[in-house]
Amino acid sequence: MTSGGDAPGMNACVRAIVRSASSHRMLIQGIIRGYEGMINGDFQPMDSRTVANIIHRGGTILKTARSKDFRTKEGRQQAYEQLKVNHIDAVVAIGGDGTFTGADIFSEEFGIPFIGLPGTIDNDLYGTDYTIGFDTAVNTAIEAVDKIRDTADSHDRLFFIEVMGRDSGYIALYTGIGVGAGTIMLPETDTNYDELVDILKAGEKRKKLFNLIIVAEGNKTGGAYKIAEEVQKRYDHYETKVAVIGHLQRGGAPTAADRLLASRLGYGAVDALVNGERNVMVGIVNQQVVYTPLNEAITKEKKLIPELVKMSNVLAR
Ligand code: F6P
């Protein structure tokens, strides 16, 4: 099943799981709409042919949801009964921390083994260098910002551009580095307006004509609109504009990197089941497939790479 926010590459991963499992002669059912489908018994038999022609498609053919009912004991009980009736012995779940938190509680309560696969554009899961969908989301954001750059440059304007990332600044950091942003505002760091205005003034002295500032959605002081408003108050001789890229980042054909990652992880999930692994997330660290217990994947924090934060500040000057 796919669960939580969709991410480009989920279909490539579903394809890899189904084809790898078929090669072991396993019987496979797709659960529709994540935990919602598990509760409602919405299952569909799958085989190699049902996953043909999807490797390049964004979204998820299995559909997805953020289930409220699965947070209740009654909902989970119903899900367990549906799994039993449908003879399901193990679940492979592609999703993020919400998905794995549910999986961890559920397998503790009912003993159903889970294999988790990191699928979220946020890249915020411990136990893997990258999550499925992150590379595509960053490429989409970079393409969008490149277009904004043309108009920002033509008008000598200051642009605040908001990218996704509720708790993690990975999308903002990679996008900011990729577009050569003047400043990157992350959820992990505090926004200091005076400091920001000083950076803009220093840029002006160096004859910097326009500025692109990347703001992560989860920035603690507020999103791009709030920051732009505050900066405009302190720095009013520059025309300020805001663009929120939003869900554009969640769609589209997965990049080569995401297709490869998704295929490796899907294949790795079936390998994990065959090797008797239970309740682990399959990730890739330094090109090697690694297993991390689900409760570690959700409780341990995946930190930003400090060297990249430092580098982005130097390269922006
Ligand atoms: O977790 C992925 C993500 O795209 C976050 O970056 C964003 O905050 C959130 O999902 C948005 O969720 P929804 O599509 O449910 O509004």
Image (spheres, grey):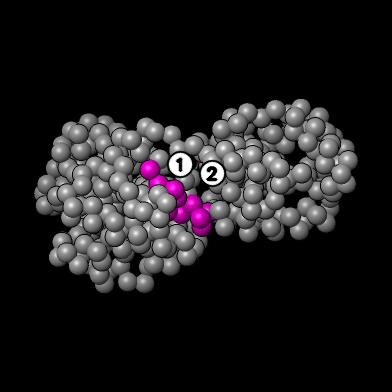
* Separation (CA) of disc 2 from disc 1: 7 Å
Seen at 57% across and 57% down, the residue is 140
The picture places residue 173, in percent across and down from the top left corner, at 59, 44
Q: Nearer the viewer, residue 278 or 11?
A: 278
The picture places residue 156, in percent across and down from the top left corner, at 84, 50
* Residue 271 shows up from this direction: yes
Secondary structure state at the residue bearing disc 1: loop
Seen at 29% across and 60% down, the residue is 267
Label 1 beta carbon less than 8 Å to ligand 1:
yes
33 drawn magenta = no
Tell me: residue 115, above or below residue 263. above
Q: What residue type is labelled 2?
A: Tyr
Q: Which amino acid does label 1 sit on?
A: Asp
Tell me: residue 176, above or below residue 19. above
The picture places residue 282, in percent across and down from the top left corner, at 32, 49
The residue wearing badge 1 is 124
Question: What residue span does the magenta drawing correspond to?
Answer: 127-137
**Residue 170: which numbered mark, if any?**
2
* Residue 117 shows up from this direction: no
The picture places residue 79, in percent across and down from the top left corner, at 20, 42
Q: Which of 4 and 67 is in front in this view?
A: 4
Using residue 193 as the reference point, say whether residue 48 is left or right of it.
left
Secondary structure state at the residue bearing disc 2: helix
**Residue 179: which numbered mark, if any?**
none
